[in-house]
Amino acid sequence: MIKPLIAILLTLPLLSVSPVPTAQPAVYHARIGIVQSARQQDCTWETAPARLRQQIEDPIGYPYGVVSAWSCAGDSAAVVAELAQRAAQMQADASAYRAAHPVTR
């Protein structure tokens, strides 16, 4: 007697007392599908067709960091130029860091 009562009480929140919504016309569903498929994806490293990554080391060979560049337009020349600029900046930072923090043996 108790088990069926508990089962009924547990299923009561699952029942809806609101009226069943009316069905939308098929045109509405098609329009929603078109709007969702027309969204553009954000340009990220994972979705870019042209991308490069390079690890930067300090003057004595310790890894300092990684630079990356990408283009969702597929412009590989722009990616190479951007990566070269970022790599040069990080290489200068790595050299300055090593000069300020020399490794003593």
Image (spheres, rainbow, N blue to C red):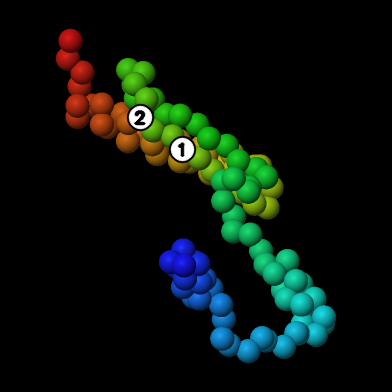
Residue 24 placement (x, y as % from top left): 75, 85
Residue 104 vs 79, above or below: the answer is above
Which residue is nearer to you in this view: 13 or 74?
A: 13
Considering every residue shown, the one lying at the far left of the view is 104
Kindly indicate the quadrant of the structure image that contains residue 39: bottom right
Considering every residue shown, the one lying at the far right of the view is 26
Residue 4 vs 25, above or below: the answer is above
Quadrant for the C terminus in the image:
top left
Residue 65 placement (x, y as % from top left): 39, 33
**How many residues crowd mark 2 within 10 Å: few (<14), some (14–19), many (20+)?**
some
Which residue is nearer to you in this view: 26 or 11?
A: 11
Q: Is residue 10 visible?
A: no
Residue 45 placement (x, y as % from top left): 56, 46
Residue 87 lies left or right of residue 24; in this view the side is left
Kindly report the distance in space between the C-alpha atoms of the residues bearing marks 2 and 1. 10 Å
User: What's under tag 2, amino acid-wise?
Assistant: Tyr
Q: Which numbered marker is on residue 26?
A: none
User: What's under tag 1, amino acid-wise?
Assistant: Val
